[in-house]
Image (spheres, coloured by chain):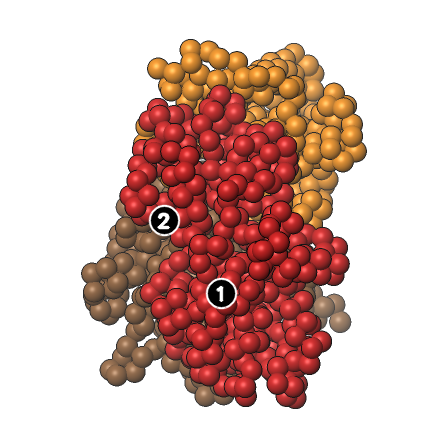
Chain colours: A red, B orange, C brown
Amino acid sequence: MKRASTKAICWMAALVVGLGLWWNAPAVFAAQAYKIGGIFAVTGRASFLGDPEKKSLEMAVDEINARGGIDGHPVEAVIYDTEGDPTKTVLAVNKLISKDKVLAIIGPSRTPTTLAVVPIVERLQVPLISCAAGIQIVEPVKPYVFKTAQSDVLAVAAIYRHMEKQGIKKVGILAVTNAFGVSGRDQLLKQADEHGIQVVSEQAFGASDTDMTAQLTKIRKEEPDAIICWGTNPGPAVVAKNMRQLGMTIPLYQSHGVASPKFIELAGEAAEGVRLPTGKILVADLLPESDPQKPVLLRYIADFNKRYGGGVSGFGGYAYDAMHLLAKAMEGTGGDKAKIRDNLEKISGHVGISGTFTFSDKDHNGLGQDAFVMVEIRNGTWKLLK
Amino acid sequence: MSEIVQYLMSGLTAGAIYAVIALGYTLLYNATELVNFAQGEFVMLGSLGLFTFLSVLGWPLWAAFPAVTLVVGLLGVVLERLAIRPVKKPEPITLIIITVGASIFLRGLAMLLWGKDPHSVPGFAAAAPIRVLGAAIMPQSLWILAVVGLLMGGLHLFSKHTLTGKAMEACAIHRSGAWILGIPSDRMAQLAFAMSAALGGIGGIIISPITMAGYDMGTMLGLKGFCAAMLGGLGSHWGAVVGGLLLGVLESLGVGFFSSGIKDAIAFLLLLAILMARPSGLLGPKAVTRF
Amino acid sequence: MTGKRRLWATTAFAGAIAVASMAVSNAYHQQLLTVIGIHTLLALGLNMLMGYAGQISLGHAAFYGLGAYGTGILTTHYGWSPWAAFPLVLVAAGAVAYVIGRPTLKLSGYYLAMGTLGLGIIGHVIFREWDSMTGGASGMVGIPPLQVGGTVLSLGRSGMILVWVVVLMAFFFCDRLVDSRIGRALRALGDSQGAAAACGVDTGRLKAVIFSFSAVLTALAGFLYAHLVGFISPSSFDFLMSIRMVTMVVIGGMASIYGSLFGASVITLLPEWLHVFSDYEMMVYGLVLMLVMIFLPQGLTRGVLDALEGVKSES
């Protein structure tokens, strides 16, 4: 029995591994198409990023193909789900490069997953346009790594500029204990001095924490002029509610992480008066006609809603911009990865969803201060702040 | 001063939730000597269920509350029938893995049914916060404390003054002994599962206006609830309540006086300390099998 | 297993690795095999504790992380060579496990499950909160790859060979261990602690020793992971990872060394296949775990074999 079982187990293991490898055997290569890889957290905790990103990439690919592709080559997107897990992302990137032989990669959705794959694309010299916010991705500049999402640097600057105008001097910070919150907190601390703002208290909360009154009470003791909360739903909504309950009337600033109608729904009445920086997509119809982004935004929103029946958000725009930037950079390269990279760096004045992109050898994000506007929530809807 | 009162109040509110969840564990453990790692998911189902009944179906709260409790309780019975009873050799290691599997399954199911975004649930009564000694007390906190108090009293009466309750206690003391005396221990196990799931559901219902309802809210609450049950002494009703409140208050004070980042570690550090120093818990029976 | 059989199995296994290292040329497949190898080490480590000694641990991800972060911190912050960090990290993991295991393993059943679970969560919180050393929630970048002579061992063929050679050695060692005096004491312990103690086994010490051995194997996997991937973040070492490790052991079969290989393969490849199900993945995962435990508590391998035996004896 024992003899037979060990052997059989060996065979079964070999069978499973073999089956797995066979299952993923290379597919027939489509003739002439330019292959682009997409890696997004389509499922899992960060699916609110990955799902619209995947949809927007598919939409952008169809748009490009409808107008005849790139130099006559159709574009084909190969998209894998990372579930927001670094190991899976690393596997997916290698699969894209070695099996699917893509020319460039769009994604991943999160900062840690992006950092995990940066060494690989740098070594294999495949252009990557990340959809994640963290500034560490493009600072210091890595030759093959670009990103389209607005960095939290810009969001923090937008908040602090508004605070300066309002005469706010002392702030308390409340950030979630994940990559998004930590990165935001670091930027808030770093930029405070240049805007003449003093951080009097710095607190954290867990992504699934249910009550933040203890942290808020601690902040209140330091008597700040305003509170800045950095996180993604539902935590920030709890913070807004808790502040109401504690009777705190000082202004609450949120991050762009909650720039969606979901926040207003979750926080309800407590959302009134909350100020936050957001990409222009949220307030596209409120923008002045002179804004160059307005027509691009309105078209994207209409197309997305028509195709997917609603659910448009700024997150999808990261992948949408990345694909259109890539299409521009691929023109005339014949599919040469080094040339695509060089062309990306030369793009200037590309009007996209997240802002107007001007890349250079020193700036691989390419967005300026105009990428963010400040909004305030009034009567359950957004109002543009000057 | 007002800060300390505020920390205490926040801690008591969170602690009351831990206490309800811990009661669920305790009840089940008493009747079946089983720990259900999917308990947290019943809390999640309670929250999302309330959201569905209130906001989607438009039921009033007084009807939605018992309806959700009933549904979650029934789910507990289903879990017992389908996943626990068929097990031939119910060893802890097997049951732990099965209930962990059940918890992943339920979470996946909830994600499909309710989506990945959290949902907002209205408070039980629209009222302004009450100010005591400079601290704000939320009306929902009072609701929570009141419900926990009622549950505690009800459970006490049930186990000491009804036949079924006494039968369940008997099962807890000696299962086969109770069986010899004609107590249907299988049915008792089923009842215990239903009650414990319903308790989890109630925890979810009363907490949802504060925390909102989302498919992934249950796991950490369930684990903290278990910590509370262990802290107070697994198997003791009063222990569950004391453990829950203590854990909530200590977490809140920990955030207040140390760092908010270590909040999640507090519960488990306490747990390890109590497991090593006094595995029977603060109020648990003295003679506990450590081996 | 007799000496001859062991020799045969090891040679066959080594042969398979040699063939695979030549035949598999696709980088993606090489990586998949690398990950399977690392997971096999994890499963093997935990199986020594769960399968043989009968002690559950729901917090082994902490040791996995300890191996990864230990070497990450030493090599990036202090500029150590990975090979210098290697023994220190393993000894540290073993020592930490022994110190913690001695009191914790006095507990049993649910108490032990909860104690180890707490350990895992505390480990996760430390990885996440100790910003200055671990890089916090964003993770830690720039862990140097391993080098032998002038060759860089990176993800790909060289990494795959390295991992599987380590797996082979671990298999060989565990196989010997199981058949040794300690192994017999372990199995006695797994069957009945009281009986083992009555036969003169120092159960408290033995449990701590095997816990510590299991932690060393797990940390070894973490060490390899950190240097091959070059990036680590706390989310790779959370509660779910601990559960995944338990699942590998359970699916592969408790107390089966080669079953660890099988379990690790299934759990690594399952999500690749489950992508067809996408949103159903979590449900299917939970369902598989429940069904296997309800109907085949000995694990898939043993369960399927028993079923086959049954069919044979009937016909």
Q: Nearer the viewer, mark 1 or mark 2?
A: 1
Residue denoted by label 1: A357
Tell me if residue C2 comes above or below residue C219 in the rendering: below
Answer yes or no: is residue A57 visible.
Answer: yes
**Res A187 label:** 2
Tell me if residue B222 comes above or below residue B173 in the rendering: below
- The three-letter code of the residue at mark 1 reads Phe
Label 1 to label 2: alpha-carbon separation: 22 Å
Q: Secondary structure at mark 1?
A: strand
Crowding at mark 1 (Cα within 10 Å: few <14, some 14-19, many 20+)? many
- The three-letter code of the residue at mark 2 reads Gln
Q: Secondary structure at mark 2?
A: helix
Q: Residue at x 45, y 75 (%)?
A: A346
- Marks 1 and 2 belong to one chain: yes
| Among numbered discs 1 and 2, the one appearing first in the sequence | 2
Q: Position of residue C238 (x, y in %)?
A: 45, 51
In which quadrant of the rendered view does residue B270 lie? top left
Q: Residue at x 54, y 17 (%)?
A: B129
Q: Residue at x 56, y 46 (%)?
A: A259
Q: Nearer the viewer, residue A158 or A175?
A: A158
Answer yes or no: is residue C251 visible.
Answer: no
In the displayed structure image, the side of residue C150 where residue A345 appears, left or right: right
In which quadrant of the rendered view does residue B289 lie? top left
Q: Residue at x 51, y 48 (%)?
A: A373
Crowding at mark 2 (Cα within 10 Å: few <14, some 14-19, many 20+)? some
